[in-house]
Image (cartoon, grey):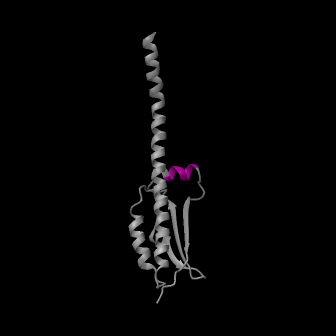
C-alpha cells in the first residue's frame, strides 16, 4: 500500500511537469518581449529628447545612432524594426515627434507565426510608439 502511493505521486508529477515547464518558459519569454518593447520605447523617448535639444531640423544622425544602438539589441526576434520604421520630425508647433513602428515577425519567429495564425489571421500585429517633445530654444 505504501509503495502504490509513492508511484501515484510520481505519475502525477510526470503528468504535470510538461505543463509547468511550458508555463515557466512562457513567463520567461513574455519577460523578453516586455524587454524588447521597453527598448523600443526608450529608443523613441531618448531620440526625441536629444532631437529637442539640437538647433538643426535634420535628425538623420540622431535617428541612425539610436537605430543602430537599439534595433540590433532586441532580445527576441518577435518584433521586427526596419530603418524606415523609425522617424524623427517636427510637428506644426515646432515640437519634435518620434515614431517607432514595429511589426510582428511572422516569417522567422515560430511564436510570431503561431500568434498570427491563431489570434489575428487577417492582420499582422504591430506596435506603434509616439513621443512628442517640446523643442527647447537654445540660449545665444
Magenta residues span 112-118
Q: Is residue 69 above or below residue 50?
A: above
State the image coordinates of residue 85 (x, y, percent, origin top left): 49, 70
Outermost residue, front direction?
Answer: 139
Dominant SS in magenta: helix
How far across and down, in percent of the image, does residue 53 sit? 47, 79
- Which residue appears farthest toward the top when viewing the image? 1
Q: Is residue 116 magenta?
A: yes
Question: Which residue is the extreme one toward the bottom?
Answer: 140
Q: In the figure, is residue 95 to the left or right of 46?
A: right
Residue at image coords 49%, 35%: 19
Q: State left or right for residue 122 relative to residue 9.
A: right
Residue 117, how many percent across, how many down?
55, 51
Say if 100 sits above or below 120 in the image: below
139, 92: nearer the viewer: 139
Q: Is residue 115 above or below residue 102?
A: above
Q: Residue at x 45, y 52 (%)?
A: 32
Image x and y of residue 26, in percent = 48, 44
The mark total stands at 0
Quarter of image, res 10 = top left
Question: What residue is rendered at 60% in x and 57% in y?
Answer: 122
Picture residue at 49% right of the left edge, 56% below the top = 106
Residue 40 magenta-highlighted: no
Amino acid at each position: 500500500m505504501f509503495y502504490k502511493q509513492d508511484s501515484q505521486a510520481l505519475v502525477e508529477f510526470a503528468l504535470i511537469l510538461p505543463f509547468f515547464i511550458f508555463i515557466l518558459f512562457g513567463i520567461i519569454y513574455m519577460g523578453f518581449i516586455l524587454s524588447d518593447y521597453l527598448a523600443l520605447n526608450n529608443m523613441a523617448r531618448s531620440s526625441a529628447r536629444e532631437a529637442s535639444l539640437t538647433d538643426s531640423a535634420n535628425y538623420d544622425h540622431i535617428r541612425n545612432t539610436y537605430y543602430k544602438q537599439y534595433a540590433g539589441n532586441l532580445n527576441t526576434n518577435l518584433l521586427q524594426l526596419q530603418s524606415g520604421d523609425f522617424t524623427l520630425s517636427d510637428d506644426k508647433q515646432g515640437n519634435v515627434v518620434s515614431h517607432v513602428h514595429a511589426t510582428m515577425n511572422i516569417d522567422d519567429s515560430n511564436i510570431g507565426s503561431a500568434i498570427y495564425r491563431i489570434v489575428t489571421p487577417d492582420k499582422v500585429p504591430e506596435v506603434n510608439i509616439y513621443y512628442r517633445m517640446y523643442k527647447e530654444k537654445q540660449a545665444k
